[in-house]
Image: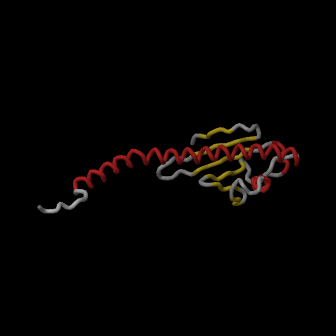
Amino acid sequence: MKDRESGFSLIELLLVVVILGVISTIAIPYLLKAIHRTEERNAYATLRTMSSAQVNFLSSNGRFARLDELNTSQGNGLGTVVAPNIIRGKFTFELSPNANPTDADLKEGYTIIATKPASSQETRYVVQVDQTGKITEIFP
């Protein structure tokens, strides 16, 4: 009697490769959507933190903060300051409409806009918060 070699046949290996291909074709778009949603929720959380920090800054200083002052008051935990903006992940946070407001401007109010630029696989995403604390999405 001859000894049979054990192992997988070419057909079995091809079948496994096809199955993995089908699974990855289905799963990868869902994974990418989940990643994008997580980034967007992170921007919301950062805007909520900024809004709360603005209220604290107002009570201490009689005006709202510029973004670099806000980041300093939060132990530089809001992101990286690239004057006059803050960069956190894929989002850029900026004061609007004036990136360098005067102290008098900051006594009246503020608007912080978070923008994630569009890439080849995702659309541009913009969300903002103002002195009322209301966070709104801006649809381009």
Measuring from the top left, give residue 7's x and y in whole percent: 25, 59
Measuring from the top left, give residue 112's x and y in whole percent: 71, 46
Determine the image quadrant of residue 81.
Answer: bottom right
Determine the image quadrant of residue 82.
Answer: bottom right
In front of the other: 117 or 96: 117
Count of labels in the image? 0
In front of the other: 129 or 24: 24
Q: Is residue 81 left or right of residue 24?
A: right
Identify the image's colour scheme: rainbow, by chain, secondary structure or one colour. Answer: secondary structure
Q: Residue furthest left?
A: 1
Q: Which quadrant of the figure contains the N terminus?
A: bottom left
Q: Residue at x 53, y 50 (%)?
A: 118
Q: Which quadrant of the figure contains the C terminus?
A: top right
Q: Residue at x 25, y 53 (%)?
A: 12
Q: Residue furthest front?
A: 1
Instruction: State whether residue 45 is above or below residue 100.
Output: above
Measuring from the top left, give residue 16's x and y in whole percent: 30, 51
In front of the other: 56 or 18: 18
Q: Is residue 68 left or right of residue 3?
A: right
Measuring from the top left, give residue 70's x and y in whole percent: 77, 52
Q: Residue at x 27, y 51 (%)?
A: 15
